[in-house]
Image: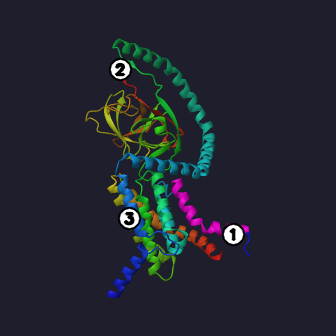
Amino acid sequence: METSRDDIGIVIRSAFLQKGTQQRFSLLALSIFSIFLIFLETIEAKPLNKVRSVVNDLVYRGAVIVSYPSKVFSDSYNFFENHIKLYKNYDEIKKENTDLKNNISNSDFLELENSQLRKLINEQVESDSNLVSARVLLDDKSPYLNSFIINIGTNKKIKKGMAVLDGKNFIGRIVDVNFFSSRVLLITDLNSKIPVISEPSGSHAIMSGHGRSNPTLDYLSLNHNIKDGDKIYTSGKEGIFSPGIAIGEVKIIQNYLEVLLFSELNQITFVSIKLKENRIIK
Amino acid sequence: MVSTPQKIWIKSIETFPLLILFFISLNGNSTINISFISINIHYIIVYYWVLRKPESLGYGFIFLSGVISDVVLGFPIGVTSLSLLFIAGAATYIRVVTVRATLLNDWMSFIPALLIANFTNFISLHYSSYPLEYIYLLKSSVFTFIFYPILWMLFSIIYNLIKKS
């Protein structure tokens, strides 16, 4: 028995400590270095952040080049799929267009009324020119993280926490900024918790992501009256995002209030980032 | 006398494990997710090639591919590297203690390697205050184990080609 225990010890030592043929580093040294790197990730310091930014930017650029063939393939597949769907969607779009035309006159009236009321209470809203556009560089699916990389960073004054929009719809926020790239955490991610308000019921809630395609509404009051089809907007309660950015509409599935997003998150190529919030100045 | 196209062929087939390792890291395809199925091909590649032909995958390259994978997928840097190095360690240990390489031997010994790697992954992510899905970890372990023979057969063809060349 003694001999077999010794043998195991020798084998483990040879596996982890010896470099072996054509190996420059030992496994143990690299494992310790990996643990050191994990520990470094928990430290927030300016020089470390700069190194992280450079490493991230370099890897992202490399990843864009390597994933180019698969991206071309998936784009072509989507193109053909959309082309086939085009004829099917035509009738639906025609009907939707007629409905929208009818609604435009209604919304014009509401906009006019809104501006008159704002004048009445001496409020002023800044223009929407604080948006900056960005292209999605990488949207690799991580097992735990629903996010993608965009092609602008501190070079365009992007900061952590800024709201990211697809057209006029809220889709996520900036969580990591490098020199020439940033990571956008999507509203479907496990970490995403956004204060929202429903319309017309006016109930406040927290929209939580679960890593699936639809987030859910949590922390609602007991006597809320949210119904299927209610629209969900950012409430602006946390003071980071502007209020009233459209997100999606409610669908009640087995007592769970799911939010069907207005934007298709896996089809996004360009996004807008709100550089500065539209503060209401009294 | 070996001709130039033959030399290129030999070189490319010899560097195949390394190329595929970096390709999946940079492409963010280290884990294949198809509806409920989730297979970690990064683990399988490292395990197979360290077990059968360790000189084709250096530990330094394994570490580097883990770092790239972490950056691309948004994990804390070092988490995937550590898991991959543990897989490589388990494969090295098994290579030393086994005499004959068969699919069944490799497959069964892949279980402890997979458990150690996923446990390391879990501990490092937990330490980094990362949200974890336990079901995902479980199904990833199960499907990676089930899928191993398919990649084993595919890699065996390439391994035989390398041996012949």
Examine the structure image and report whether residue A240 is included in the region drawn in magenta.
Answer: no
Residue A281 % position (x, y)? 35, 20
Tell me the quadrant of the picture where the C terminus of chain B can be found. Answer: bottom right
Local SS, label 3: helix
Q: CA distance from mark 3 to mark 2?
A: 54 Å
Which residue: 36% across, 26% down? A200
Query: Of label 3 and label 2, which has the lower sequence position?
Result: 3
Q: Are marks 1 and 3 in contact (CB under 8 Å)?
A: no
Residue A46 % position (x, y)? 38, 45
Relative side of B60 to B124, left or right: right
From the image, give the main secondary structure of the stretch colored magenta: helix
Q: CA distance from mark 1 to mark 3?
A: 38 Å
Report which residue position mark 1 lands on: B7
Report which residue position mark 2 lands on: A281
Q: Rate crowding at label 2 as few (under 14), some (14 to 19) or many (20 or more) other CA atoms within 10 Å.
A: few
Looking at this view, is B113 or A85 the one in front? B113
Same subunit, tags 1 and 2? no
Residues rendered magenta in the picture: B4-28
Q: Amino acid at mark 2?
A: Ile
